[in-house]
Image (tube, rainbow, N blue to C red):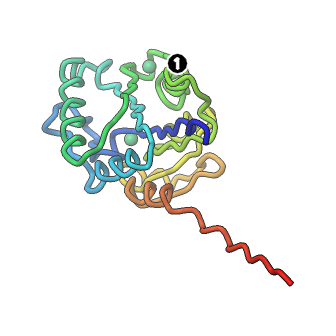
Amino acid sequence: MGTPALKLIILDRDGVINHDSPDFIKSPAEWLPIPGSLEAIARLNQAGYRVIVASNQSGIAREYFDMTVLNAIHQKMHTLAQQVGADIDAIFFCPHAGADNCDCRKPKPGMFHEIAKRYNTSLKGVPTVGDSLRDLQAGFISGCVPYLVLTGKGEKTNETGGLPPGTQVFPDLAAVVSHLLKAPAAPAPTVAFSI
Ligand SMILES: [Mg+2]
Ligand SMILES: [Zn+2]
């Protein structure tokens, strides 16, 4: 028995874990989990996954909220997660706006590269879950396997199309997790004949 490989999964935040808003999530009060999402994270943890969030938060650059508020929002997320036995290992976020032309704002892969560095691992085959095309693009070019959820902006993203090759579509995070954790088919019984 060797050391089990590090199992990672990278989630977008708004529209995947919590309800999104076209007006941004600007306070802890506005951060409301999508039913079943935190429980799904707990199931991932139980299966040995470390759950990482990678989130564009241009509301910082736009001065809709500041770092103190973003930290408070994430504190609420952690607290509600803990209440159902879920653990979010790390949160990576991009505070920039598009005009800043940074390397971390999805669809650019900067946050994914940071994750790979932090965990000292390749992201090849790591599942990534998003509701926007740019989430899936950033993951795909980083070697991740893209999953689109239809929560948040997902319905619209699915209709628009142009998804990275191999993108799988599920109603929500809970459904993605059920798919990922499906027990592999039992091996066919070996029947030994002796004469
Ligand atoms: Mg999103
Ligand atoms: Zn950035």
Q: Is residue 85 left or right of residue 165?
A: left
Element at label 1: loop
Total marks in image: 1
* Residue 156: image location, x then y, percent: 44, 53
Residue drawn at x 53%, y 44% is 127
Q: Quadrant of the C terminus?
A: bottom right
List the single residue furthest toward the front: 195
Q: Residue at x 57, y 37 (%)?
A: 5
Tag 1 residue = 103
* Residue nearest the viewer, comparing 51 with 73: 51
Q: Is residue 154 left or right of residue 18?
A: right
Q: Amino acid at mark 1?
A: Asp
Residue drawn at x 51%, y 39% is 7
| Residue 166 x, y percent position in the rendering | 64, 52
Query: Residue 28, how many percent across, how many down?
Result: 16, 34
Residue projecting furthest to the right = 195
